[in-house]
Image (cartoon, rainbow, N blue to C red):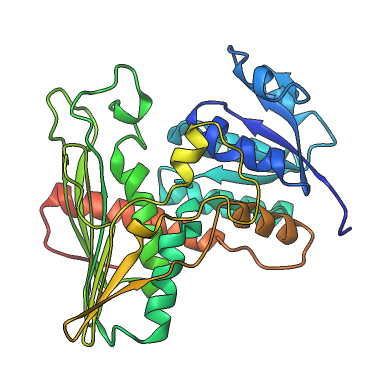
Amino acid sequence: MRNKVIKTGLIGFGTGGEYFHAPFIHVLPEFELTAILERSKEKSKELYPKAVLIRTLETLLAIEELELIVITTPNDTHFELAKKSLEAGKHVIVDKPFTVSTAEASELIQLSKRKNKLITVYHNRRFHSDFRTLQEVLKSGALGNVTEYLACFDRYRPELRPNAWKELEKPGAGILYDLGAHLIDQVLVLFGKPLAISADLRMERAGAHAVDYFKVLLHYEHHNAVLQAGMLVETPGPVFKVVGTNATYVKYGLDPQETMLREGRFPEGSQWAVEPKENWGTLYSNGLENKVEPVYSDYRAFYKNVYHAILNEEPLAVTQEQAFEVIRCIELAMKSSVENKAKISL
């Protein structure tokens, strides 16, 4: 079983499929990119000629040798595609966010258990070097007790993208489901479930139909976690700023993996996505500044974990319950903003 290759079908070949999933399925010897579902285009055929080009979901799921289905389509399609894949007896990876509602997420979790098939969510930013480094900084105790946590995901895109599904008025659209899902997942990994949530969600750009700015506060017993993202930020602030009773840790600059993938580079080698030294985080303590050498990490770790989980050798890194909690926090953040409530208790 250790040499088993998992034949994999990919649904969707937009940004997610092309850059964030297909390269990893392709380079990892544990997987075979067997079939790709593109409903009208043929872009995947140029990059992965050995994969069978499929036009319909029914045809894809009918391929008996496929054990794993990876879903990289718009958020409001995740539930139906995942449900049909599980019903067909396949293991499933869903690109984040899991679903657009907790009701959908709960139904998929129950179905996966009945079918005895794995389902997990691609919260890939857990596998960023900057996040893994932050985990180690917190674990070391260098900060003391955390009193403030700030995570930002700033972008500058003042113009709307015509017909981009993420900017339409539809379930699962907007940057809370997109960027917010990443930031919420990271906080839950670091600190667990909060006591309460409050949020300010806005549409700031002219003509916007979906949330393009958020500030979400997750309230813990001794600190708040502030998560913030917008599309009008020309001068990005720190990715992380964590204040403690003994020190403060600040990190600027994004993990290089996305840029490298969009450049068409395949994730190969032991040091594929090393952060440049100018982007290393800084620990401030007693008037001293110390650069923190990052802990290496890349998205291949997610797929390797799924491989071993399918073979019943290790637990999932991203569990169904964790993915469900991200959606629950998103729902409560939306409720807080709509109802203009200071806090909504979990």
- The answer, for residue 39, to whether it is visible in the render is yes
In the depicted view, which residue is nearer to us: 205 or 268? 268
Residue 345 placement, left or right of 97: left
Residue 116 location, x and y as percent?
73, 56
Q: Position of residue 94 (x, y in %)?
A: 56, 44
At horizontal 71% and vertical 61% (from top left) the residue drawn is 309
Position of the N terminus, as image quadrant, is bottom right
For the residue pair 234 and 164, the one nearer the viewer reads as 234
**Residue 123 visible (yes or no):** no
Report the front residue among 94 and 117: 94
Q: Quadrant of residue 47?
A: top right
Q: Is residue 100 above or below residue 121?
A: above
Query: Relative to 280, is 294 on the left or the right?
Result: right
Task: Identify which residue is drawn at 40% across, 46% down.
Answer: 101
In the image shown, does 145 or 170 lie closer to the viewer?
145
Left or right of 48 on screen, residue 331: left
Indicate whether 257 appears above or below 150: above
Residue 93: x %, y % from top left: 61, 46
Q: Quadrant of residue 178?
A: top left
The location of residue 82, given as percent across then percent down, is: 60, 40
Residue depicted at x 63% and y 35%: 22
Left-right relation of 140 to 312: left
**Vertical order, 24 against 218 (above or below):** above
User: Going 42% across and 69% down the picture, which residue do you hit?
Assistant: 293
Quarter of the image that includes the C terminus: bottom left
